[in-house]
Amino acid sequence: MESSRARRRRVPLLYAALASVAVVDGTAAGTVYVKAQAHSPRGAQSAVSSSATPSVVAASGEASVEPVAQPTVDLDGLLAEAMESVTVAEGVEVSVAVLEVDSGESAAYGDASFDTASIVKVDILATLLLQAQDEGRALDSAEKAYATAMIENSDNVSTSASWETIGRAKGLDAANERLGLTATEGGDGMLWGLTQTTAADQLTLLQQVFGEDSELSEASRTYLQGLMGQIAVDQRWGVSAVADGSGWALKNGWLPRSTTGLWDINSIGRVTVDGRDYLVAALSKGNTTKAEGVTLVEAAAEAAVSVFATA
């Protein structure tokens, strides 16, 4: 598998200026037209367009300047192109969404619904923290112990206890309505791992956890971010594979489906790459093995971040 740097693409812009000037009654009058053209490999040219033709008009010795239209980039199109280099086995589905934190620009590939497996544990803790905020209290010692085990070690017993505390799916769904998740539905009964979600919704959840414009208080965000930055060593895979050193905070999910024997493999989190922060959610299902799924979500995360690379 190529590294993310090897696959990064630049979409350079070439501006060609054509000018014509005529002299009428001794007065210079003319128009300069500037046309934006996009050039990039493998069809990326179609992902860049300009909404208007900028011009500078000079007449009777006076000049007026019209706003110069900036080219717009179809980031979803570039991500789709980047995903062409990712090997996806027959019968496997994958979706990925990414947001570049500084610019606020995002891209998504695929809109299918997936089982959350253990990535729902971030959503469960966000719900618990939101409920505690509403009650004007901090988490008690038992809730904190469950939260630590649930996020850092992906402990299922602790998750089930927390799932009960928040009111199961009903509590999760009510919190998600406030958090802005529109395509996530809690699992039936105690089947929290079968909560349904999309990559786009998980990106929204990450924005609530890592962004300042959030329903979660600063203290709640800091607490959850801290746990996601201390994942057990054997679970440090997925989106963290593209990060620089320790520049990551994540939660992974893996679940072999009893009905098919195939694996759900998911990864969500924040990564720092070349000094820039990204939020990334990569989801997959139908993998023959866990290792196959891990490789897939890591490759999808690399493709997602490569869209914003400049070199």
Image: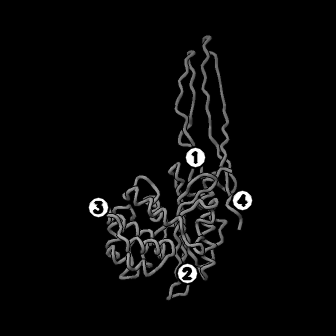
Q: Badge 4 is on which residue?
A: 6
Dot 2 and dot 1 residues touching (CB under 8 Å) = no
Residue placed most toward the observer, 27 or 54: 54
Q: Amino acid at mark 2?
A: Trp
Cα gap from disc 1 to disc 4, whole angstroms: 25 Å
First in sequence, mark 2 or 1: give its number. 1
Cα gap from disc 2 to disc 1, whole angstroms: 40 Å
Residue placed most toward the observer, 131 or 238: 131
Residue 168 placement: quadrant: bottom left
Cα gap from disc 3 to disc 1, whole angstroms: 50 Å
Give above or below for 295 relative to 177: below
Q: Amino acid at mark 3?
A: Gly
Of badges 4 and 3, the one in the foreground is 3
First in sequence, mark 4 or 2: give its number. 4
Q: Amino acid at mark 4?
A: Ala
Residue at x 68%, y 48% (from the top left corner): 39
Of badges 3 and 2, the one in the foreground is 3
Q: Which mark is residue 230?
A: none
Q: Badge 2 is on which residue?
A: 263
Q: Badge 1 is on which residue?
A: 49
First in sequence, mark 4 or 3: give its number. 4
Q: Which mark is residue 136?
A: 3
